[in-house]
């Protein structure tokens, strides 16, 4: 848009609507800053707003710009200046181009059916809230590069260079009970040999083995088969529950 205005301004200089606005106070500094931003984009490195502002502050402290601009030390590199800089240099914020999996169309219906299923069984078998839980396993990578970067407007696709370890993950297990109790988070490492480090006492960690989850599921299935005289599922003792979440 800025480049189009400049071309129209050369053709019709008397039209005030085509005015590109006030000129930058530190044009040479901004030209060098724009070159460095484009150089990082060419190397597929992510560029954030904070990086641009910090780089502008570091350039302002260089002797050549202090001699050329006497009042540059008093300038505040604010967000308003950043937006003007991005607009004048035809930059915009982009998200890394990925191929995402779409959610199924019947997702909300499945949620409601599962919720009704759980509520019905709780009423039918009189499950106590402290024995009903929800667990979620979330894979986290050791290297988490940013998916957002600054690049020229209209550039597609957007790629970001990484160190190659973003697919090396560990699993964090979060669980809570229906009565509001939050269980300790559990961290599972895929490596067989984990370094002997001092892990926080408020977290549980273990090595991943092929039969670790199967053994716990087998223990749970064996215990919940016991029924009371009335035919309801027998409430397991607390030591068994501790084994489930161990």
Image: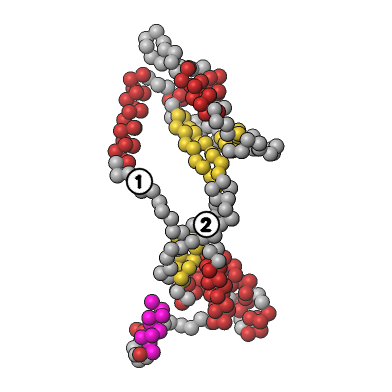
Mark 1: which secondary structure? loop
Q: Residue at x 36, y 48 (%)?
A: 102
Quarter of image, res 55:
bottom right
The spot of residue 68 in percent (x, y) is 63, 85
Disc 2 marks which residue?
146
Q: Residue at x 46, y 70 (%)?
A: 152
Residue 172 seen in this snapshot: yes
The spot of residue 118 in percent (x, y) is 35, 28
Q: Residue at x 66, y 37 (%)?
A: 194
Provide the major secondary structure of the magenta segment: helix
Residue 72 position (above or below residue 220): below
Image check: 242 left or right of 17? right
The spot of residue 151 in percent (x, y) is 48, 68
Q: Which portion, as a residue range, is magenta?
A: 1-10
Q: Residue at x 63, y 35 (%)?
A: 192
Q: How was this image coloured?
A: secondary structure
Disc 1 marks which residue?
103
Residue pushed farthest top? 229
Residues packed near mark 1 inside 10 Å, few (<14), some (14 to 19) or many (20 plus): few
Residue 12 position (above or below residue 129): below
| Total numbered circles | 2
Quadrant (top left, top right, bottom left, bottom right) of the C terminus? top right
Could you say which is closer to the camera, residue 148 or residue 120? 148
């Amino acid at each position: 848009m800025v480049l189009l205005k400049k071309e129209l301004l050369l053709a019709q200089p008397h039209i005030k609507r085509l005015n590109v606005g006030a000129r930058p106070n530190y044009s040479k500094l901004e030209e060098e800053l724009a070159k460095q931003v484009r150089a990082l984009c060419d190397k597929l490195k992510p560029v954030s707003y904070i990086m641009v502002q910090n780089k502008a502050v570091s350039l302002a402290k260089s002797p050549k710009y202090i001699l050329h601009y006497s009042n540059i030390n008093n300038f505040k590199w604010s967000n308003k200046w950043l937006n003007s800089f991005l607009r004048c240099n035809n930059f915009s914020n982009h998200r890394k181009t990925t191929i995402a999996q779409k959610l199924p169309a019947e997702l909300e219906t499945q949620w409601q059916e599962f919720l009704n299923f759980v509520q019905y069984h709780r009423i039918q078998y009189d499950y106590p809230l402290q024995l009903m839980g929800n667990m979620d396993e979330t894979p986290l990578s050791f290297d988490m590069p940013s998916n957002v970067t600054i690049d020229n407007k209209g550039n597609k696709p957007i790629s970001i260079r990484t160190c190659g370890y973003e697919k090396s993950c560990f699993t964090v297990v979060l669980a809570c009970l229906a009565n509001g109790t939050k269980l300790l988070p559990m961290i599972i490492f895929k490596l067989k040999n984990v370094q002997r480090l001092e892990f926080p006492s408020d977290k549980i960690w273990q090595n991943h083995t092929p039969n670790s989850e199967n053994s716990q599921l087998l223990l749970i299935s064996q215990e919940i088969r016991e029924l009371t005289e009335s035919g309801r599922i027998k409430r397991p003792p607390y030591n068994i529950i501790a084994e489930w979440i161990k």
